Structure formats: C-alpha cells, structure tokens
Image (cartoon, helix red, strand yellow):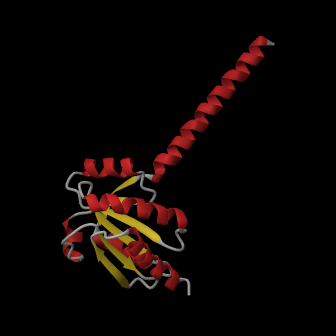
C-alpha cells in the first residue's frame, strides 16, 4: 500500500512539474523573438492580412521612446484580437542579442523580428519609434515617428481598427 501511495505521489509530482513547465513555456512564447525578416516578407504578410489593419512598429532596445511605446502596444494586443489588428515589431538594433534581451525583458505579447537597412531605405526611416499602420486593404493609412502620448497613439490606432470594422 505504501508503495502505491509513493508511486502516486511521484506521478503527481511529475504531472505538476510538467504543468508548470507548460505554463512557463506559454508565458515565454508571448515574448518570442522570431528571428530576421526582410521588406518582401513584411509586404507579403501585409498583403495576406487584407481585411485586418496591420500595425508595424520599428524600434531599438536603446531608444527611450520605444520603451514607452511597448506597454501601449502590449495593452492593445490584450484588448484586440488578431482579426481586429495585427501587430508586428521590427528591431533595428545592430545587435540581435540586444533585441532578443529587450523582447524578453519587455515581455512583448506580439511578434518581434530583426530587420536591416532594407527597412530603413524602403520606409525612409529617419527616427524611431516609427509606426506604420496599414488599413484593412493593405494601404498605408498612418505614419508616426516618435512617441508623444499614449492617448494620441491609441486614438490613431483605434481610428483605423474601428474604420476596418465598418
């Protein structure tokens, strides 16, 4: 009888450990750094998202305004479904390790990629954070450089989300 109880306890401990590992993996998946991307891949993703607005945020780990923007993007991701708004972030850090660390520290809950000079050239990026909002038809609808206030930023984003649902 004691062996049976002991065996049951071991099974329960293994099951609980597995559950905690699964929960931990789910949390870390939210802050997943997805590797490198390029302009063509981003444009393809935007084209495939027709019917849904797409917000693209260009940032760097060393940028204070970028750090202020992340919590707003996280709250938008929590409030809106993927069908209402796709959010994609692209790091312009030279160091991929710095970008990965930033994504993990900030616990981003939206996809994060590493970008290169092709983005800077294609979208004429002269300052960050730079946010491009593409409407539900895939057309550039808003272009923000810098981060002023959460209220202004949210209002701009929500205008395009609400416009897509009409």
User: Does 62 sit left or right of 138 as displayed?
Assistant: left
Tally of numbered tags:
0
Residue at x-position 47% and y-position 77%: 158
Q: Residue furthest right?
A: 1
Q: Residue furthest top?
A: 2
Residue at x-position 51% and y-position 81%: 51
User: Does 43 sit left or right of 1 as displayed?
Assistant: left
Residue 164 percent location from the top left of the image: 51, 83
- In the displayed structure, 153 sits above or below 97; it is below
- In the displayed structure, 56 sits above or below 161; it is above
Residue 38 percent location from the top left of the image: 28, 67
Q: Is residue 114 visible?
A: no
Residue 9 percent location from the top left of the image: 70, 22
Residue at x-position 41% and y-position 52%: 32
Q: Is residue 3 visible?
A: yes
User: Does 108 sit left or right of 4 as displayed?
Assistant: left
Residue 95 percent location from the top left of the image: 22, 51
| Quadrant for the N terminus in the image | top right
* Quarter of the rendering containing residue 88: bottom left
| Quadrant for the C terminus in the image | bottom right
Q: Residue furthest bottom?
A: 166
- In the displayed structure, 81 sits above or below 16; it is below
Residue at x-position 24% and y-position 61%: 92
């Amino acid at each position: 009888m004691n062996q049976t109880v002991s065996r049951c306890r071991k099974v329960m401990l293994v099951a609980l450990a597995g559950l905690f590992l699964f929960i931990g993996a789910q949390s870390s998946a939210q802050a997943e750094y997805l590797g490198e991307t390029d302009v063509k891949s981003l444009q393809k993703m935007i084209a495939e998202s027709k019917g849904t607005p797409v917000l693209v945020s260009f940032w760097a780990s060393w940028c204070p305004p970028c750090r202020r923007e992340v919590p707003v993007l996280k709250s938008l991701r929590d409030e809106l479904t993927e069908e209402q708004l796709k959010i994609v972030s692209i790091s312009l850090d030279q160091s991929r390790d710095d970008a990965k660390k930033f994504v993990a520290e900030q616990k981003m809950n939206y996809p994060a990629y590493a970008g290169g000079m092709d983005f800077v050239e294609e979208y004429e990026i002269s300052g960050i954070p730079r946010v491009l909002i593409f409407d539900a038809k895939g057309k550039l609808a808003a272009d923000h450089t810098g981060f002023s206030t959460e209220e202004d930023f949210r209002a701009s984003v929500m205008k395009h989300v609400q416009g897509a649902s009409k």
